Image: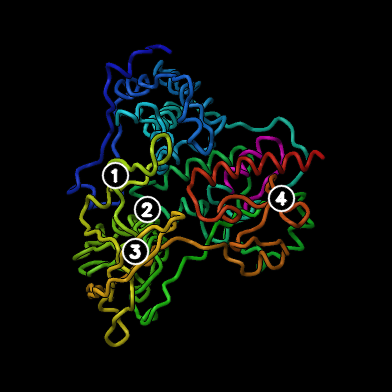
Amino acid sequence: MGNPKAFMSIDRKEAGYRPVDERVCDFSEVEQTLNIEDRKLQASRCMDCGVPFCHWACPLGNKQPEWQDLAYKGKWLQSYKVLTSTNDFPEFTGRICPAPCEKSCVLKLHEQPVTIRENEAAVAERVFIEGLINPIIPKQRTGKKIAVIGSGPAGLACANRLNRKGHTVTVFEKDETIGGLLRLGIPDFKLHKSVVDRRIDLMKTEGVEFKTSVNIGVDITTKEILKEYDAVCVAIGAGVPRDLKVPGRESKGVYFALEFLQQQNRVIAGVQIPDAERINAKGKHVLVIGGGDTGSDCVGTSVRQKAEKITQIEIMPKPPVGSNPETPWPLYPMVLKTSSSHMEGCERRWNLDTLRFLSENGQVTGVEVEEVEWTKDENGRMNLKRTGKVETIKADLVFLSMGFVHPLYEGLLQELGVELNERKNVAVDGSHQTSVNKVFASGDAALGASLVVRAIASGRDTAESIDEFLKA
């Protein structure tokens, strides 16, 4: 290590966010950046501890001590190479990952973990800005063809790895643009789409072929796909949102979160949406049902659309603030998370169950909720108890943000004939192979809805399995 005592003399310093009154007026990224010298100092704080719990906690197994030491020494390209040996897209995870590595950093014991996520983004940006990245084009092709169905983080990671092994890869996407969740699900204020475009352009230069607006099973039959390609990777995500089937659900103004977020991303990209189909929070009372990251994205988007009032509710109890004895270090702490969107203006409430949607002339006007209490039984299972305390929350616009349950099955999975597990995800073995020969599944389609970083890891590992399959 260049400075083995830096963690003792240098405090954690975050880049922070742009001022609220400035950032709520646009959809540009809210997070700021540190200057190069400050960033080097932050990287120097990695103490190269004997047991790197950050490495253990990272789904990708990133080698934090190695690449951060190189960043501290200003060896940006070498740092990037170490980082991308495990993580294909550090420019994505450096922006949107919840950083389980930081939660398991030894310095987290003193609430001063290394700024690993920000350092990761800085390394990726530095090599792109300085023009240090050259396309990696295979010198020789294997003659094997692979179809990757779905262009989200899992599909892109799988395609990237297989292409660099010399296979010919075609990525099929049902939407009009490449990127999946990265493109249409995550707001620009967290991940600007120019960052996605930059990576896609690089992959194209390296030889990956992308085909958009192609619905496999409809536009191209699965028989044609299986005949033409030597292997197929299903990376279609978990596209079925969890619904809330209570009275009044059919009311106008009640949407799934992703309907809202996808439309706004398309609007920013220049797509013309008819006024009658536009979901606009301007001047409205917005209620977000669900307390996770996607719900937070709905809050931030509603703020930028100038909503009158925004409320976010969650059926579960409010998490502890700061630390939680039930999830001690080095486990990921289940504590209250306050996002940049929450800081922009939002009332947050917990222990509320939705009973019904109220409406006038078919338009939602409010949501009736009941307070609940939670207790644990002797087995540690949470049990819900109703209190009978009912109230109505005014709402002109409601977004359901309660997660996703399983992949969309329309056409594709039925035609492929792959087996599903008890959770209705694609059943795979240890090598990500499905019940159908030469068909593999990756990311949320197999794992269930999870983190982008887990999807990238799954895509990477699936590529290894496909490569071994093709060599057999």
Residue 245, percent from left and from top? 43, 76
Mark drawn on residue 433 = 4
Residue 179, percent from left and from top? 51, 51
Q: Quadrant of residue 472?
A: top right
Residue 41, percent from left and from top? 32, 20
**Spatial distance from mark 4 to mark 3, Cα to Cα?**
37 Å
**Spatial distance from mark 1 to mark 4, Cα to Cα?**
40 Å
Amino acid carrying mark 3 in the image: Ile
The correct choice, above or below, for 254 with respect to 472 in the image is: below
Q: Nearer the viewer, mark 3 or mark 2?
A: 3
The tag earlier along the polypeptide, 3 or 2, is 2
244 within the magenta span: no
User: Element type at marker 2?
Assistant: helix
Q: Quadrant of residue 350?
A: bottom left
Q: Give the residue number, with chain letter if any, for mark 2.
A: 293
Residue that extends furthest to the bottom in the rendered view of this protein: 361
Left or right: where 88 falls relative to 16 = right
The residue positioned 27% from the left and 28% from the top of the image is 13
**Spatial distance from mark 1 to mark 3, Cα to Cα?**
29 Å
User: Element type at marker 4?
Assistant: loop
Amino acid carrying mark 1 in the image: Val
Q: Give the residue number, with chain letter if any, for mark 1.
A: 30
